[in-house]
Image: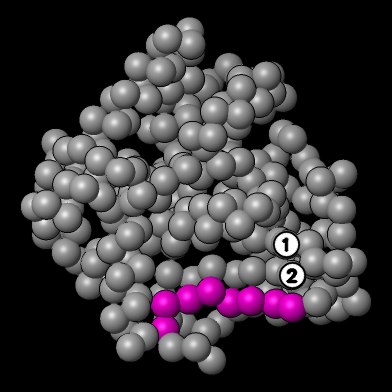
Amino acid sequence: MHRNLMRIFRLYMLVGGMPQAVNEYLQTNNFRKVDTIKRDILNLLWGWFQENRLNRKAFHFFFDAIPAQLNKNAARYQVSSVLANDRADSILELIAELKDSKLFLFQYHANDPNAGMSTNKDLCKFKLFLCDTGLFTTLMFKDKDFTENIIYEKLLNDTLNTNLGYLYENIVAQILTCNGNELFYYTFFNETSRHNYEIDFLLASRNKICPIEVKSSGYKTHKSLDEFCKKYSDRILDKYLVYTKDFG
């Protein structure tokens, strides 16, 4: 039952929720045709950028670089590595406009992981996700004219030999947002182990917080979650490990 549900879940991750893409899959069961639809949607979004006087540089920053930035596992979206002469604090107005567009999901660093994280979020330290994970999947393989059926099939069967952690983070970000949550994450340095750790998502519940760690595979190590719970044991209500295998 679990394997079947995970296959259905991955199918949604591949197709996404855009009505045209869903309809194309239902009619043809052909991932290549679905991918064509999603590329058309991305082209329409590029038209939206042009109509709103947002230049190609901005489009590259907010679309083409999203998968690569997430794959770096960096502590923030590195604006300067995409836009050579810009920093996050120099494009805050543009970020606010695009956040309002509902096309993107912005996740901010919580400087103090506690209840009321909105009051201490760092506007210049953020990560960026796409509003629809199906579109994000197409962006991941945009280097090809189309995403071949074999790639989709391997993704669907969980047999593709590549790091899909950022794909699963995108779907978790989408789910949390759709349930009315603002997105936060947290990074910290442990003096004893001399390591940097990161909590993928933080939720506030009552006067406590709930850390969430997302894994794309079945391994059960979660050092960041463990260290975070030691550091802030008095603040934690529940802690969650989201991964692809059986519930444990």
Does the magenta-highlighted stretch encompass residue 232? no
Does the magenta-highlighted stretch encompass residue 241? yes
Q: Position of residue 239 (x, y in %)?
A: 70, 77
Q: Position of residue 187 (x, y in %)?
A: 72, 57
Residues 152 and 226: in front is 152
| Residue drawn at x 65%, y 41% as measured from the top left | 126
Q: Position of residue 79 (x, y in %)?
A: 57, 30
Residue numbers of the magenta segment: 238-245
| Residue drawn at x 42%, y 77% as measured from the top left | 244
Q: Mark 2 and mark 1 in contact (Cβ < 8 Å)?
A: yes
What amino acid does circle 1 point to? Answer: Leu
Residue annotated with mark 2: 210
What amino acid does circle 2 point to? Answer: Cys
Residue annotated with mark 1: 203
Q: What secondary structure is the magenta-colored segment mainly?
A: loop
Where 197 sits versus 24, above or below? below
